[in-house]
Image (cartoon, rainbow, N blue to C red):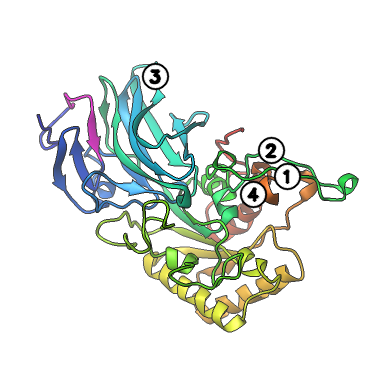
């Protein structure tokens, strides 16, 4: 039995899968459209895709960048989701039902269904599922939502879209691990937790908190250890050691061990989600400095940054673009890199590119795994950025995270 939405009122099949780009039933593909047809069609039931998704495969859309997710409105009392996970480490996901308190679950390798909510009062509800883990640790494939005896409604639409391009800090590396306070009593050298995917929360990273403060949906293109021109080992951007300007061109993060190869899914394309963003934030440079303690050669670094900005502008013609670094970089490198960003902005000759600043991390408030920011520090970072950005955007930001997850 196949179900078409044409001329259909309430679906009679409880397990109905609608991707927006590929309209599916439990039994197969019924039609193929562009990746963003669902964005402009508010009357057709569909699932809304958050962040970068690739629709080129036969079995269903795939994603793996941090914060990539799915959102749906539905009528019913329950919902579950079926995902196919290819992971090299445990992948985690955050769930928000009806805008309520976030909950987190661990995925398992292979195809499986996960209960998201049961016992809801009968009526209209919303559900959102987003990836907590960065792409190098695995890839997820979406097979469908199950609403029991309920049915899918037209998709929710974001008021604003924000994309963040960054490193481990933007991914939320170690931010919900055991927090350690470093102060004079322990000579600022207390032992800190070791990273695992269980300690990483993209939802509580400053990038996602900042987006929520503006009421925006976030696409988080981030990779631990990578930079603009070179990584934290000093490896320069190349096919073997791709840095953010290279992987920015991909709908799927390619690690070689996560089932994805570099540039196998170019972004943007007819087979990817590609709606332009209203706000773009670039937080890079920490790893470019890490290997030597100083900025790389200015010429190549400047060219790499300007080329990235050209691609960002081409993909997001109307966006306000913000550049920053921090909070793990301190003086004199911090001032040096901020001056470098000012030089890049002048060279770009784009009146909608701005520098915004974050303070150096206050380790007396606690540090996360491998001395990264904790979720408390993430909140402070987001608040500081929002205060600078709201005047430029002309959009008021909330004074705190409207829906935090408490580890």
Q: Nearer the viewer, mark 2 or mark 3?
A: 2
The first of marks 2 and 4 along the sequence is 2
Establish if 275 lies above or below 129.
below
The residue beneath circle 3 is: 118
Residue 5 falls in image quadrant: top left
Label 3: how many residues lie within 10 Å, few (<14), some (14-19) or many (20+)?
few
> Which residue corresponds to mark 4?
383
Q: Nearer the viewer, residue 238 or 246?
A: 238
Horizontal arrangement in the rendering, residue 334 relative to residue 212 (left or right): right
Do the residues bearing badges 2 and 1 touch, measured as CB atoms within 8 Å? yes
Answer left or right for 94 relative to 121. right
Image mark for residue 178: 2
CB atoms of marks 2 and 4 within 8 Å: no
- Distance (Cα) linking label 1 and label 4: 25 Å
> What is the CA distance from the residue labelled 2 to the residue labelled 4?
23 Å
Q: Which mark is residue 192?
A: 1
């Amino acid at each position: 039995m196949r179900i078409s939405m044409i001329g259909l009122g309430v679906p009679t099949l409880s397990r109905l899968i609608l991707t927006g780009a590929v309209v599916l039933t439990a039994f197969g593909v019924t039609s193929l459209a562009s990746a963003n047809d669902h964005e402009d069609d508010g009357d057709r039931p569909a699932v809304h895709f958050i962040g970068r998704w690739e629709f080129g495969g036969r079995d269903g859309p795939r994603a793996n960048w941090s914060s990539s997710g799915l959102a749906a409105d539905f009528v019913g009392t329950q919902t579950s989701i079926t995902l196919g996970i290819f992971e090299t480490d445990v992948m985690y996901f955050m769930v928000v039902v009806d805008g309520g308190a976030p909950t987190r679950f661990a995925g398992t390798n292979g195809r499986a269904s996960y209960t998201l909510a049961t016992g809801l009062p009968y009526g209209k509800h919303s559900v959102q599922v987003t990836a907590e883990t960065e792409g190098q640790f695995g890839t997820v494939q979406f097979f469908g939502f199950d609403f029991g005896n309920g049915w899918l409604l037209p998709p929710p639409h974001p008021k604003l879209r924000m994309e963040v391009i960054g490193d481990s800090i933007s991914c939320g590396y170690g931010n919900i691990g055991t927090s350690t306070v470093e102060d004079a009593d322990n000579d600022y050298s207390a032992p800190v937790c070791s990273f695992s995917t269980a300690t990483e929360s993209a939802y509580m990273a400053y990038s996602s908190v900042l987006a929520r403060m503006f009421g925006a949906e976030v696409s988080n293109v981030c990779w631990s250890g990578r930079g603009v021109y070179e990584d934290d080992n000093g490896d320069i951007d190349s096919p073997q050691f791709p840095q953010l300007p290279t992987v920015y061109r991909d709908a799927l993060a390619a690690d070689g061990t996560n089932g994805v190869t570099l540039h196998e899914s170019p972004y943007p394309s007819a087979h990817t989600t590609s709606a332009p963003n209203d706000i773009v934030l670039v937080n890079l440079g920490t790893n470019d400095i890490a290997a030597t303690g100083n900025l790389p050669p200015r010429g190549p670094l400047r060219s790499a940054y300007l080329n990235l900005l050209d691609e960002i502008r081409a993909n997001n013609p109307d966006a306000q673009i913000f550049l920053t670094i921090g909070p793990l970089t301190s003086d004199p490198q911090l001032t040096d890199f901020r001056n470098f960003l000012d030089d890049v902005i002048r060279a770009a000759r784009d009146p909608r590119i701005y520098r915004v600043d974050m303070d150096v991390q206050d380790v007396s408030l606690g540090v996360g795994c491998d001395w990264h920011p904790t979720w408390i520090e993430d909140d402070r970072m987001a608040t500081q950025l929002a205060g600078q950005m709201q005047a430029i955007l002309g959009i008021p930001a909330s004074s705190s995270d409207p829906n935090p997850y408490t580890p």
